[in-house]
Amino acid sequence: MLDIAGLHRPGLMPVSFALPSGACIAVRGPSGAGKTLLLRAIADLDPCEGNVSLDGVNRVSIPAPSWRRQVSYVPAVSGWWADTVGDHFQNWSAAAPLLAHFKIPEDAAAWPVARCSTGELARLALARALATQPKVLLLDEPTGALDDETTAAVEAVLLDRIAQGAAALWVTHDTAQAARVASRFLLVEGGAVHEAAQL
């Protein structure tokens, strides 16, 4: 269970909600409304105030690297710091089944990052995050750069992981996708976050 209580930062008004294990909340709202700020605040990537806890343990008592392994933020545009794809994975072989589901060939480990398309980088970043077995996924438009077929494949993997007990906060601009993946919905407008009956 991820518990958020009075979390706020510049551009994000205080927000409180709970995200149980095995659940997905879809987050929607116009561009610039504060959706990414919310995910980054939960991931402890930016200065913020309020209380965030995981399974009853407050974030302040968990070292930041450990927190981010358990509560994994997958940005809309991922970061790449080495020349080849495989250098960004702790264990490429362990990630191979995920990569196969995401239609990434096994020899992609040797690819230069520069040769990858936007969609390939999005799938690789998602596989990189999932490979660490996080308890919570903070997904910032994870299928925004993908075609319909690949979107369906990614959704299937993520929904399977949620069914196994992971929790997800899933930002999407696609109303149909929100209805497919989530049973609860948050709407972000002007930095204010509130629960909505539907989107």
Image (cartoon, grey):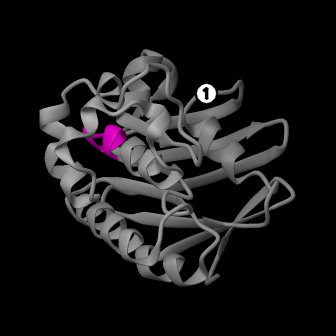
Vertical comparison of 197 with 22: above or below = below
Identify the amino acid type marked 1: Leu
Residue 106 among those drawn in magenta:
no
Q: Is residue 73 above or below residue 123?
A: above
Q: In this view, does 61 lie to the left or right of 186?
A: left
Q: Give the range drawn in magenta.
A: 127-134
User: x and y percent of residue 164 in the render?
Assistant: 19, 59
Q: Mark 1 points at which residue?
A: 45
Indicate left or right for 107 with 136 as reference.
left
Task: Examine the rendering and report whether any part of residue 130 can be seen.
Answer: yes
Q: Nearer the viewer, residue 1 or 117?
A: 117
Q: Quadrant of the C terminus?
A: bottom right
The percent position of residue 128, horizontal first and vertical second, equals 33, 38
Q: Quadrant of residue 46?
A: top right
Quarter of image, res 62? top left
| Residue at image coords 43%, 38% | 72
- Report if residue 133 lies within the magenta region: yes
Query: Residue 3 location, x and y as percent?
Result: 49, 46
